[in-house]
Amino acid sequence: MVLLVDPDDALLAAAIEALDPDLIQLHGQETPQRVAEIRARTGRPVMKAFGIAAVADLRALPAYAVVADRLLLDAKPPSGADLPGGNGRSFDWDILNGAELPAGTMLSGGLDSGNVGTALARTGLAAVDVSSGVEIRPGEKDSDRIAAFVAAARRRA
């Protein structure tokens, strides 16, 4: 998997050539048209991430559900954040109550082994994505934290 933010065609081609990823995760302001173009150009499945802070943020999902293979609901990054995700913040999962989410929608944002079970139970989603919740310091994943996270998620599944 490769995570890209608003990639132009040159960056996209370089990432595909260098990494040969199974999946492309997009965390920028890519339009539905651009997501479809990236999927067609690369022949790779695409996951489109969305920053969620309010019910209104869910309105864009249907337009992307027809062009992306998966949708990822993440917390909106704090103002001035350097990263579009992986900030260790969750959003109010109650925002998803009653929402008709496309099949394959995943949850992210501030998840760790202590809250992933609750997150899955409250949202009804079946898949999650984690980054900072399994790190011992920014960018450094810990195998014990990964194992604990997976075990906690599986207990809920």
Image: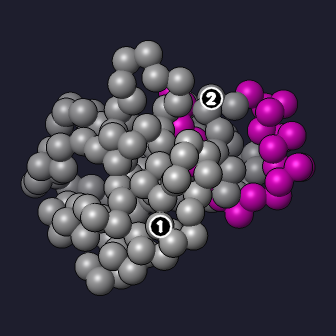
> What residue lies at 81% left-to-right and 44% top-to-bottom?
15
> What residue lies at 62% left-to-right and 29% top-to-bottom?
6
Q: Residue furthest top?
A: 80
- Asked whether residue 101 is drawn in magenta, I would say no
Of pointers 2 and 1, the one earlier in the residue sequence? 2
> What residue lies at 26% left-to-right and 79% top-to-bottom?
156
Give the colour scheme shown.
Answer: one colour
Q: Which mark is residue 46?
A: none
User: In x, y percent, where is residue 25?
Assistant: 59, 48
User: In x, y percent, where is residue 53?
Assistant: 24, 33
Apparent side of residue 125 relative to residue 93 in the rendered image (left or right): right
Q: Place residue 157 in its image quadrant.
A: bottom left
Against 121, residue 106 (above or below) is above
Amino acid marked by disc 2: Asp
Secondary structure found at label 1: helix
Marks 2 & 1, CB-CB < 8 Å contact:
no
Q: Nearer the viewer, residue 2 or 150?
A: 150
Q: Nearer the viewer, residue 114 or 155?
A: 114
User: In x, y percent, where is residue 106?
Assistant: 38, 59
Q: Place residue 114 in its image quadrant.
A: bottom left
Q: Point out the stretch of residues depicted in magenta.
A: 8-29
Q: Nearer the viewer, residue 15 or 35?
A: 15
The residue pinned by badge 2 equals 6
